[in-house]
Image (cartoon, rainbow, N blue to C red):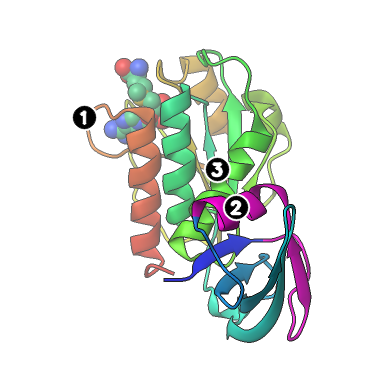
Amino acid sequence: MSVRLFVDSPLKLKQEVILTENAHHYLVHVMRSVVGETVLLFNGKDGEWAGEIEKISKKEVQLRLVKNMRLQSEEKKSDVWLCFAPVKKDKMDFIIQKATELGVDVLQPVITRRTVVGHINANKMQLQAIEAAEQCERLSVPEIRQPVSLDLLLDKWEKGRTLYYLNERGEGKDFEKKKKVAYLVGPEGGFEPQEIEKIGLLKDACSVHLGRRILRAETACISVLAIHNHLCGWK
Ligand code: SAM
């Protein structure tokens, strides 16, 4: 199986691509790649391309694109965001990796009153999403947004995007297939009643639950995205 890497450069036939730093280290020292080998490249815009390694130096791997493997339009995606209160490191890594595999477009950390996690490194999260996208054969990488407070998230809510907020103690309406949707999962300690009240005032918000058992936040994130994919025919 060929190595698959996300790159930040345009991809088209015969294009030369130079890989440096982490990508160079991975190809040369981890995968022990040699001249003539094929590497698959994608950039989230131009589909997936096979590139042949032409030259390897101490700091660079030079490739030439030889074949388009998949068009960007072949990635059928639904427009879905996951808004979630940050949890501790291992669980956060798990959420980013699994949500990427499950096709989310945007990961939005949301600071609620009971959120206990302090510093959030969105750049590091973005690298984890890239790694997960490389592994799961996505053609796109989810956007990791900078953390926002729950109040700001609601105040600036995009008109017409349904916000399903997961409320283990609330009334559960049925999930419906929506064109533009976001799922909001609370922190380990849950939402405060005033927060639930405020979310419920948003015109596009809708309370849902995943049964009467209390799920860990990360379980709730993954479960709801699996339900979403089922509703959307696993696009
Ligand atoms: N501390 C809360 C309690 O005991 O009621 C539980 C919070 S739960 C660990 C974290 C988040 O996961 C919740 O805020 C909610 O968004 C989501 N969640 C957990 N179980 C759920 C369920 N059965 N239905 C809907 N959402 C759920």
The residue wearing badge 3 is: 128
Q: CA distance from mark 3 to mark 2?
A: 10 Å
Foreground: 156 or 120? 120
Please say whether residue 28 is one of the residues in the magenta stretch.
yes
| Dot placed on the residue nearer the N-terminal end, 3 or 1 | 3
Q: Residue at x 55, y 47 (%)?
A: 129
Q: CA distance from mark 2 to mark 1?
A: 30 Å
Q: Residues within 10 Å of mark 2 (few under 14, many from 20)?
A: many
Foreground: 16 or 12? 16
The residue wearing badge 1 is: 213
Q: Residues within 10 Å of mark 3 (few under 14, many from 20)?
A: some
The amino acid type, in three-letter code, at marker 1 is Arg
In screen coordinates, is 84 left or right of 153? Answer: left
The residue wearing badge 2 is: 142
**Residue 127 position within the rendered picture, expressed as x and y whole percent measured from the top left:** 61, 43
**Residue 181 position within the rendered picture, expressed as x and y whole percent measured from the top left:** 54, 53
Which residue range is magenta in the image?
Answer: 7-30
Q: Residue at x 75, y 81 (%)?
A: 12
The amino acid type, in three-letter code, at marker 3 is Gln
Mark 2: secondary structure: loop
- Answer yes or no: do the residues labelled 2 and 1 have beta carbons within 8 Å? no
Q: Does the closest atom of ligand 1 sit within 8 Å of the Cβ of label 1?
A: yes
